[in-house]
Amino acid sequence: MRDKRVLWWMLLGFLLVSLAAVQVLPAYAESTPVSVAVQEQERQVDDESTADHTKFEILKQDFKNAVEVTKACLSCHTEAAKQVMATYHWTWERTDLPTGKKVGKKVVINNFCVAVVSNWRRCTSCHAGYGWKDANFDFTNEELVDCLVCHDTTGKYKKFPPGAGHPVYEPKEFPPGSGKIWEPPNLSEIAQHVGPTSRNTCGACHFYGGGGDGVKHGDMDSTLKAPPKEVDVHMSPEGANLVCSDCHYKGTHRISGSRYHVTAKDPHGKDLPVPDENPATCESCHGLAPMKDAKLNDHVDKVACQTCHIPAFARGDKPTKMWWDWSKAGDKERGVEKDENGWVTYDPKKGEFIWAKNVTPTYLWFNGKMDVMTLGEKIDPTQEVYINKPHGSPDDPESRIYPFKVFRGKQGYDPVNKVLLVPHLMPYNEEDKTAFWASFKWGPAFEEGMKAAGLSYSGKYDWVETTMYWPITHMVAPKEKALQCGDCHTKGGRLEGVPGVYIPGRDRVAWLDTVGWTLTGLALLGVIIHGGMRIATASRKK
Amino acid sequence: MRRVYLYTRYERFWHWAQALILIGLGLTGAEIHGVYRWLGFEEAYELHTYFGWALVVLVAFTIFWHFTTGQWKQYIPTLDRVDAMIRFYTVGMFRGEPHPYKKTELSKLNPLQRLTYLGFKIIIVPVLGTTGLLMIYYNRLPEWGIHVSLGTLAAIHTAAAFLLLAFFIVHVYMTTTGHTVFSNIKAMITGYEEIPEESPAAGD
């Protein structure tokens, strides 16, 4: 009797608790902010590592310079430097596979800061090494590899802009006259807190290409350190929270993905279980039929994922540079000018700029191959001069319609030898007066630049407009923000002018439409006349 | 006056269902073609595809109906009295002359209707349907050994659509040329048409 009563009470209690749970739990799930869920997901870096670098005696020393740190790293990581030295991060030079031509930062010329040669110590602040300040840098010295620039987790390691890859070892001012003092980093602390690369470490160079935040790429700037989901669905802490190496890493320090050889179409698809050579393509994770709608998937043979899923570039906090006119540089009286947004539009050291945010890309057929101009190549100044030119055509099965940032500028060329000129911008040292940023004279700057590049210079210079293409692949928007059908399937839409493909809504056979509408008009006219005559003659009917 | 049962229940259903579907296809198709903007391309495309599939189903049933009922014989073309028909529509009608063709249950289509509807059934609709389906499955055509460009398919589809539009305009107008302005439409709704017993004496 009593047992039964207990049983009933227990049942009643169980029912009440269940009811309460049903009421409360969904409410809890709904109210959990996305950020909490993300925090829970966030990679537990320290937990994953099998080594605690704060426990290594060798890292507790008072490092004289960063090279000493590398020596300490290599005492355990014996193969690391060899691996890095085999990569583009170290060589700044690569072989373009189809042509065998040497390309890469070392040998190309562009319309931003133009060329590395003769400007080494400024440019090489983004070299994964120490001390590349002239043509004699030792590319075989393992101790010159910079481990910290990629593996610092403290955010306190900074390479000094004109330091040829070194951080400062005593307080220094940069930019000169700015009053901004660069303090020497605590190398021991940093060395004890190394870890995997992050958006911050990669971004320290890649977000600032061209000499400033967001200047070069258009689809990369410092916003990507922690972007809102709207800006980049992959890298956003509220999104997939991916870091660069989740896509751009192939093991043993090798990096996948290259602007010199883009994978515009990846017929291999998903890289698990069997990877291909480039795990950084969209298809590597999303496969070959990534969308739910079959008709949308029909587009992937001709339209790159980026075309629809990156509706605009420079969508973060920073604008990107669209135009750079070096010919206007040197007017110190004009001084630095800014527009209403506070963006620098004139700098006597660099010339005139145009910036833009939320830029609609230019769309071209692209098969991933780039014609890249290198130092000393002949140009025809009467034609458009291309710094690089994407290959591709509608008839090429490797090509897809791909988005680009088109960057234009004006830069010096030799009207006699018909080559783009290498300007010596960054003085080698305080005594060097040939550099443009020391004397503000182009003659000696071009002369020294060309001499350093081993190229002949007629002594005459003029200005020529040049064009450079930047494939757009980052800043992928959430799918709700992707382009809609009507953005391209219309007259005057996004893909207006892209040749060789019939786009319903954009295209038609003009004469057929004329014939068709004429026929329609005649039919209407016919019935109107016929009907009118019937009404007019109705009285005759009895 | 004689009440003739011309159109059976299925035939009337078929006619009006097809009319609705084709009007839907025409409106959405014109938007896809960029003639005007209302629903937006995506919505227009989706509706157009749904209407297209609906037409496929309807046509499948109707082909079955044609052959099981023997109604296909109504469409056997003939040139018999076509000249009289043409004369009636161009001249006789305005003089109040009687229609030269007498509708009966066994032969409800006049020679011009036979020719036009047959063309509609064996040329315009099949061409539209075939090119439409080929465009839906465009990316799989190479696998199936079919090599044709989207532009060509779209052009043929458009050409047939214009023919259909012209047919539609004339067809709707012609419904008013019956015994009374609405007698033909009434017949297609109720199935029965009122037909004069004997035409009044020819020539007034």
Image: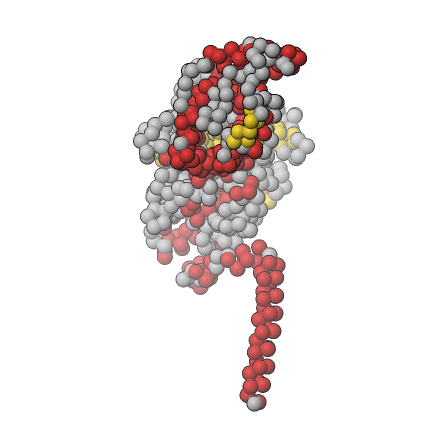
**Residue at (52%, 33%) from the top-left corner?**
B12
Write the residue at 50% across / 21% down. Answer: B102
Q: Is residue B156 visible?
A: no
- Residue B136, image x, y percentages: 43, 34
Residue A334 in view (yes/no): yes
Q: Position of residue B164 (x, y in %)?
A: 49, 23
Q: Quadrant of residue A224?
A: top right
Write down the quadrant of residue A9 in the picture. Answer: bottom right
Q: Quadrant of the N terminus of chain A?
A: bottom right
Outermost residue, right side = A340
What is the x, y in percent for residue A256?
39, 42
Res A179 quadrant in image:
top right
For residue A5, above or below residue A42: below
Relative placement, left or right, of B136 versus A36 is left
Quarter containing the C terminus of chain A = top right
User: A363 and B82: which one is in front?
Assistant: B82
Q: How many marks on residues?
A: 0
Display coloring:
secondary structure
Q: Residue at x 33, y 29 (%)?
A: B146
From the top left corner, tell me how far across and down residue A427 is, in percent.
51, 32
Residue A39 or A151: which is nearer the viewer?
A: A39
